Image (cartoon, grey):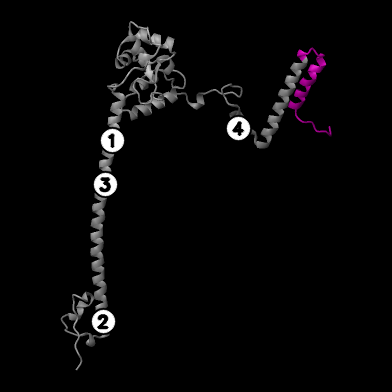
């Protein structure tokens, strides 16, 4: 009599079908029974795999939520630090341990201005620039009051201020001239970064900025002194082609050299025919080529 082998479902969970309702033992299993066992095992594996993937998905979702929360908190902290920094550099409050550098500078010793405006004149006369510290020292007013009083007569250049509220100031005549488009762009970018601190600059530049001129309305000639030579060369080359451009350039240089030689001969009081020689050569260079058979 054969010994019957029973399947422990706790130890061989993949074969728990063996203890099914049919009551068969391993020795009595047919090939169809084993195929059923294998299919059951595959189904059980798929179920366990799906369960593990669901758990992993929940874990990943939790980690993503934690990371998103950390990123949000970090971004809020960065924004808060940025806002605190902007407020600090634009509030015009001096630190308690601040000392005016001109308090021990001989250029301000013994000099006194009756008003802030007089202090500005002295700063331009003695230093050649707008120096808020100097004006504050000679006038006796705080830097903040000096700036508030002179606003409109002076402007702070965002390219030179170095995030120091009393640095980088220029007279309106100096600031509102030159490359206004570059200054306008710099003021616009700085105004966005520093929460409207340079809005006065933008309004002042817009008031004096010339109207935009379309390219089609700009009159350009090859002799315009503001047109770079390389631009003229590129234009001629695009019209004539590369080979003809070099022929044209060599011809132009030759004509120029002949013209200079003609002038030098005239200055040296050489005979008139010597001067005309160069002129005739230039005319010959500009003439149409003649067929040698004629």
Distance between the alpha carbons at the discs numbered 3 and 1: 16 Å
| Image quadrant assignment for residue 156 | top left
Residue 91 placement (x, y as % from top left): 28, 23
Q: Which residue is mark 1?
A: 79
In this orientation, does residue 153 appear? Answer: no
Dot 4 or dot 2: first in sequence order is 2
Distance between the alpha carbons at the discs numbered 4 and 2: 86 Å
Q: Residue at x 74, y 16 (%)?
A: 263
Q: In the visual, does 135 lie left or right of 274? A: left
- Compared to residue 52, the image places residue 181 above or below, namely above
Q: Which residue is mark 3?
A: 68
Q: Which residue is mark 2?
A: 34
Distance between the alpha carbons at the discs numbered 3 and 2: 50 Å
Q: Residue at x 26, y 81 (%)?
A: 34
Residue 83 placement (x, y as % from top left): 28, 31
Q: Residue at x 59, y 23 (%)?
A: 221
Q: Secondary structure at mark 2?
A: helix
Q: Secondary structure at mark 3?
A: helix
Task: State which region is magenta.
Answer: 266-294
| Viewer-side residue, 242 vs 90 | 90
Dot 3 or dot 2: first in sequence order is 2
Q: Residue at x 26, y 76 (%)?
A: 39
Nearest to viewer (mark 2 / mark 1)? 1
């Amino acid at each position: 009599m054969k010994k019957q082998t029973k399947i422990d479902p706790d130890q061989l969970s993949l074969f728990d079908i063996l203890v099914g309702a049919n009551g068969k033992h391993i020795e009595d299993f047919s090939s169809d029974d084993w195929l059923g066992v294998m299919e059951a095992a595959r189904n059980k594996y798929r179920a366990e795999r799906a369960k593990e993937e669901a758990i992993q998905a929940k874990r990943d979702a939790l980690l993503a939520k934690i990371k998103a929360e950390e990123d949000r908190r970090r971004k809020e902290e960065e924004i808060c630090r940025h806002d605190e920094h902007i407020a600090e550099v634009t509030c015009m409050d001096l630190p308690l341990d601040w000392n005016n550098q001109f308090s021990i500078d001989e250029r301000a010793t013994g000099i006194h201005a009756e008003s802030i405006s007089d202090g500005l004149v002295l700063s331009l006369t003695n230093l050649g620039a707008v120096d808020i510290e100097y004006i504050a020292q000679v006038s006796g007013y705080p830097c903040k009051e000096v700036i508030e009083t002179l606003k409109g007569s002076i402007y702070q250049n965002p390219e030179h201020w170095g995030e120091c509220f009393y640095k980088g100031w220029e007279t309106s005549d100096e600031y509102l001239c030159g490359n206004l488009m570059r200054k306008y762009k710099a003021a616009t970018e700085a105004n966005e970064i520093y929460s409207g601190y340079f809005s006065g600059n933008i309004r002042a530049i817009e008031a004096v900025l010339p109207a935009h001129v379309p390219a089609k309305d700009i009159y350009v000639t090859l002799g315009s002194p503001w047109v770079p030579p390389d631009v003229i060369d590129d234009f001629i080359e695009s019209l004539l082609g590369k080979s003809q451009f070099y022929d044209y350039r060599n011809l132009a240089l030759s004509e120029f050299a002949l013209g200079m030689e003609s002038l030098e001969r005239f200055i040296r009081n050489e005979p008139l025919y010597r001067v005309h020689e160069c002129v005739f050569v230039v005319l010959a260079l500009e003439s149409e080529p003649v067929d040698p058979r004629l």
